[in-house]
Image: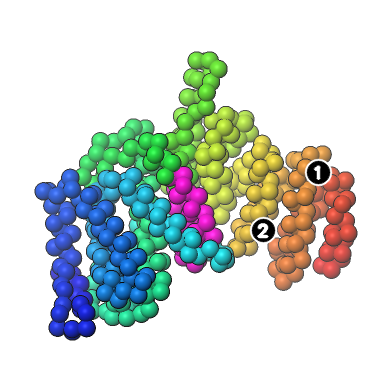
C-alpha cells in the first residue's frame, strides 16, 4: 500500500500517516460516485489555500501542501475524468492558478522548445518530476515517502507543480469535450465520463483561460511553455466546435451555413485522426474553406484561431504529405486574410526554434509573397524588415540564411517597387553575406 508520512512541528515522533490507496479507493467507491467530484474540488481548494499560506513562510502549511498535492495527483491519475464532473468550478480554479502564475512570471522571457502532444502519463510524469526535485518521493512507488518535504525555502513553493496540474486538468476536460463533439452527440453521463455541458459562463471562462495561457506560455520555463502550447491548441479547438453561427438573411442561407458548419467540424475531426491520409484530407478541406472565404471560418474569431493552430501545428509534421498541405494552407490563409495573417506568418517564421520548421514556414511565406503581386506593398513593412533581420542574424546558419535571401528575391521579382524604401538596408545586408 502506498502511504505518505510527514512530521508535524519539530517533534520527530509526531507523525501523520495517510494511506493514499485507501483514500482513492474510498473516493472511487459506489457510495461516493455522486460526491467524488465535490470531494475532489474541495481537495483542489484546500491545496490552493495551503499554497497561499506556504507563501507566507508557514513551514507547516508547506508540508501539508505537499501531502495534499500527492493525494490530488493520485486521485487524478487513478480516477481520471470521473472526478471532473463540476467542470465549471474546476475551470475557475484553473484560471486562478494560471492567472496568478502569469502575474508572478511577468517580465521574464523564454523561448518554447519543440512541442509534441502530451499524454496524461507525460503530464503526470512532469508533475512527479517537479515534486521529486523538491524532495518528495514518487507516489507511485511502494513504501513510504519520507522525503524532506518543506525543507527548502517557501519562496515560490509549488508554483510550477500547480501550473502543471492546472494544465493537466484542463487537457482532460478538453479531451472529453472534443470526443463528445466529434461523436456528433453529447454522450450520457457515466461515472467514468461525466457529461460536459458548455453554457455561456463556461465558454467565457474558457476564453479567459485561452488568453492567460498565451501569457503564461510566453513568460515561463520551457516545460510550462510546451504544455501551454499543447493545451492552447485543445482549448482553441473546443471553442471553435462550440462557436455559434452568425445571423443569416434567410432560411436558405441558414441551411447553407449549417452544412458548412458540419463540413468544418468534420474537417477538424479528420485532422485529429491517427491516419495520415485522413489528416491530410482534413487540412485540405479547411484550406478549401479558407480559399472560398467561408463565413463559418472568417466570421468567428475562435474558428479562425483553431484553423490557424491546425495549420501551424502540422507544418512540423514528420510526414511530407501532411506538412506540404499545411504549408499550402498557411499560404492560402495569408492570401484570404492578408492584413491580419501575413504579419502573424512573418512572426512565426522569425520565432521558429527548429531549422526545419523555419524552412517550412519560409516556403509558406514565399508562396504568399509570390501570389501577392502588386498588393505586396501593403505587407512589405511587415515582411522586409523581418527578413533583413534574419539575414543579419543567421550568418552561421547557411540554410536559414539562404531561405531568407530566397524570400527577399521572390519579393523583388514580384514587386520591386514595394522594396524601394528599404534598399539602403537590403543592399549592405546582402553585400555582407
Q: Nearer the viewer, residue 218 or 48?
A: 48
Residue lying at 43% horizontally and 57% vertically, measured from the top left: 98
Magenta span contains residue 280: no
Task: Give whichever of discs 1 and 2 has the lower sequence position.
Answer: 2
Colour theme: rainbow
Q: For the residue labelled by badge 2, is the local secondary structure a helix, a strand or a loop?
A: helix
Q: Position of residue 403 (x, y in %)?
A: 73, 58
Q: Position of residue 26 (x, y in %)?
A: 13, 57
Above or below residue 426? Residue 331 is above
The residue carrying mark 2 is 350
Q: Is residue 102 visible?
A: yes
Q: Nearer the viewer, residue 72 or 174?
A: 72
Q: Which residues are magenta?
A: 206-234
Q: Position of residue 131 (x, y in %)?
A: 34, 71
Q: CA distance from mark 1 to mark 2?
A: 20 Å
400 left or right, relative to 298: right
Q: Position of residue 198 (x, y in %)?
A: 37, 37
Main secondary structure found in the magenta portion: helix
Tag 1: Cα neighbours inside 10 Å, few (<14), some, or many (≥20)? some
Q: Are marks 1 and 2 in contact (CB under 8 Å)?
A: no
- Residue sitting at the far front: 56
389 left or right, relative to 330: right
The residue carrying mark 1 is 377
Q: Is residue 122 visible?
A: no
Q: For the residue labelled by badge 1, is the local secondary structure a helix, a strand or a loop?
A: helix
Amino acid at each position: 500500500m502506498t502511504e505518505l508520512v510527514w512530521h508535524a512541528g519539530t517533534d520527530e515522533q509526531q507523525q501523520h500517516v495517510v494511506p493514499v490507496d485507501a483514500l482513492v479507493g474510498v473516493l472511487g467507491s459506489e457510495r461516493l460516485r455522486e460526491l467524488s467530484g465535490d470531494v475532489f474540488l474541495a481537495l483542489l481548494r484546500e491545496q490552493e489555500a495551503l499554497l497561499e499560506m506556504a507563501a507566507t513562510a508557514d513551514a507547516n502549511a508547506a508540508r501539508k501542501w505537499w501531502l495534499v498535492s500527492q493525494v490530488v495527483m493520485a486521485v487524478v491519475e487513478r480516477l481520471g475524468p470521473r472526478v471532473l464532473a463540476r467542470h465549471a468550478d474546476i475551470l475557475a480554479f484553473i484560471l486562478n492558478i494560471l492567472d496568478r502564475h502569469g502575474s508572478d512570471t511577468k517580465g521574464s522571457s523564454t523561448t518554447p522548445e519543440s512541442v509534441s502532444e502530451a499524454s496524461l502519463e507525460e503530464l503526470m510524469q512532469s508533475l512527479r518530476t517537479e515534486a521529486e526535485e523538491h524532495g518528495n518521493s514518487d507516489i507511485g512507488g511502494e513504501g513510504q515517502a519520507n522525503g524532506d518535504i518543506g525543507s527548502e525555502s517557501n519562496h515560490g513553493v509549488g508554483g510550477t507543480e500547480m501550473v502543471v496540474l492546472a494544465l493537466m486538468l484542463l487537457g482532460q476536460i478538453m479531451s472529453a469535450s472534443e470526443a463528445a463533439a466529434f461523436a456528433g452527440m453529447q454522450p450520457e453521463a457515466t461515472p467514468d465520463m461525466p457529461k460536459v455541458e458548455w453554457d455561456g459562463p463556461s465558454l467565457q471562462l474558457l476564453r479567459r483561460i485561452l488568453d492567460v495561457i498565451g501569457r503564461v506560455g510566453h513568460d515561463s520555463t520551457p516545460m510550462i511553455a510546451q504544455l501551454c502550447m499543447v493545451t492552447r491548441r485543445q482549448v482553441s479547438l473546443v471553442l471553435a466546435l462550440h462557436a455559434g453561427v452568425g445571423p443569416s438573411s434567410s432560411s436558405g442561407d441558414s441551411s447553407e451555413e449549417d452544412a458548412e458548419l458540419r463540413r468544418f467540424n468534420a474537417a477538424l475531426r479528420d485532422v485529429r485522426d491517427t491516419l495520415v491520409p485522413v489528416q491530410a484530407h482534413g487540412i485540405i478541406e479547411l484550406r478549401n474553406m479558407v480559399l472560398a472565404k467561408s463565413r463559418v471560418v472568417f466570421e468567428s474569431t475562435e474558428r479562425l484561431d483553431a484553423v490557424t493552430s491546425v495549420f501551424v501545428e502540422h507544418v512540423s509534421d514528420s510526414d511530407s504529405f501532411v506538412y506540404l498541405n499545411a504549408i499550402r494552407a498557411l499560404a492560402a490563409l495569408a492570401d484570404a486574410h492578408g492584413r491580419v495573417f501575413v504579419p502573424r506568418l512573418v512572426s512565426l517564421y522569425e520565432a521558429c526554434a527548429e531549422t526545419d520548421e523555419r524552412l517550412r514556414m519560409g516556403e509558406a511565406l514565399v508562396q504568399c509573397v509570390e501570389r501577392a503581386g502588386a498588393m505586396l506593398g501593403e505587407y512589405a513593412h511587415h515582411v522586409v524588415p523581418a527578413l533583413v533581420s534574419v539575414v543579419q542574424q543567421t550568418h552561421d546558419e547557411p540554410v536559414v540564411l539562404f531561405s531568407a535571401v530566397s524570400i527577399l528575391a521572390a519579393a523583388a521579382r514580384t514587386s520591386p517597387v514595394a522594396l524601394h524604401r528599404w534598399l539602403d538596408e537590403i543592399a549592405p545586408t546582402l553585400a555582407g553575406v
